[in-house]
Structures are given as C-alpha cells and as structure tokens.
Amino acid sequence: MPAPDGEAMTGVARFSRTRQVLEPAFLEGISDLSLEEVRRRRAMALAEREFLSFLRRLVQVRRDALTAESQRRATGSAPPPLLEELQRVLSQGPPRARVRGEAVRVVLPAEDVEEAERRADEMVGRLIVDDPRALEDEHLAEAIEVLARGEREVSGDRSAVMRVHDSLQDELKHRYREDPSRALS
C-alpha cells in the first residue's frame, strides 16, 4: 500500500505519519471536512494503528525470548535448542486485549513490515544478538528493560492513534445517520 501521498514510506516518513495522525490539528474541524477527507484520514489512522500493532508484537516477541532466557538462567536449567525455544515463545501469541469488534487485518505492506523490523531492532541496538544465550547477564537484563520501555512507548502511541481513529469513525457514523446515502458514495 503506498503512502497517503503516493510515495513509499521511509523511516522518516513513518515517524512523520505517526506525528501527523497524533497532531491535534489532524482532528480539528472534522465536522467541516469533506466526506472524502474524513475517510482518507481514517484510513491513515487505521494504517498507522496496524503498523504500531505489528511493531508492538515484534517488540514483545523479542522481549519474550530474552525473558525466557533470563528465567532459564534463574532456574539453572539447561538451554533448549534455540529453534525449540523460539517456537515456544512464538506459540504463546500476543497478550489478550479487549476486542474492538472489527475484523483483524493480517496483511501489512512490505514497507511497513520492513520499517517495523528496523524500529524493533533499533530499540536494543548493540545489546541484541541472534542467540540470547550469548548475552552476558547484565546485557540481557538491560535489553529486556529497553524492550519493555519500547513496548510501553509503542503501546501509548497505538492507544492514541486508536482514539484518533475512533473519533474519525464516530464522525463518519454521525454523517451516515444523518444521510444514509453517504455510506454508499
């Protein structure tokens, strides 16, 4: 999916899109905007929500893998094969959240996937390696904390974007109630 302006999303544009959606001006005067503009902004907010949801899950998987290694060390148990441990962490799935009553989108544009992976990797930078068992205890603990902090930040942005999306959705519902034929246009 191309960026709203037709250009491919880059890291700079991604941060710009998040800022743009969360900027108070994004919702100012929504009742005066054209129906097409409200729909465009809602689509932009939805795209950002999906991106942030994916990014949050990537961060959670990384943190879960490191936490599992930390717990294994604390119990003194032998390390399982790396592939087996990765399968266990991934099979746990994301934490359960409240359902929003809408279909879950599962396909992200390649640019969004690449950007989310880049941002998740950037969070821990030099602290992460392919095999968590290779990290020293202090680096392992530091990486877990950095990822937990990163997850909180992404979750905060995601929640704020969801509120923006909901405001735009409410505006559309209001317009459709006033004139149901608008929903077909």
Image (cartoon, rainbow, N blue to C red):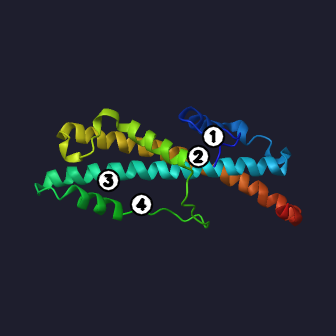
The amino acid marked with disc number 4 is Pro
Using a 10 Å C-alpha cutoff, classify the residue at mark 2 as few (fewer than 14 neighbours), some (14 to 19) or many (20 or more). Answer: some
Q: Are marks 2 and 4 in contact (CB under 8 Å)?
A: no
Q: Distance between the residues labelled 3 and 1?
A: 29 Å
Picture residue at 77% right of the left edge, 54% below the top: 171
What kind of residue is marked 2?
Ala
Q: Up-down: is 75 above or below 12?
A: below
Residue at the disc numbered 2: 160
Say which amino acid is labelled 3. Answer: Asp
- Which SS class for mark 2? helix
Lower position in the chain sequence, tag 2 or tag 3: 3
Q: How crowded is mark 3: few (under 14 residues within 10 Å), some or many (20 or more)?
A: many
From the top left corner, tell me how far across and down residue 55 is, in percent: 47, 48
Give the foreground label among 3 and 4.
3
Crowd band around label 4 with a 10 angstrom C-alpha radius: few (<14), some (14–19), many (20+): few
Q: Which of marks 3 and 4 is nearer the N terminus?
A: 3
The kind of residue tagged 1 is Leu
Residue 3 placement: quadrant: top right
Label placed on residue 64: 3
- Residue 68: numbered disc: none
Which residue is label 4 attached to?
Answer: 95
Q: Kindly check if marks 4 and 1 are in contact, taking CB atoms under 8 A apart as contact.
A: no
Name the residue beneath numbered marker 1. 22
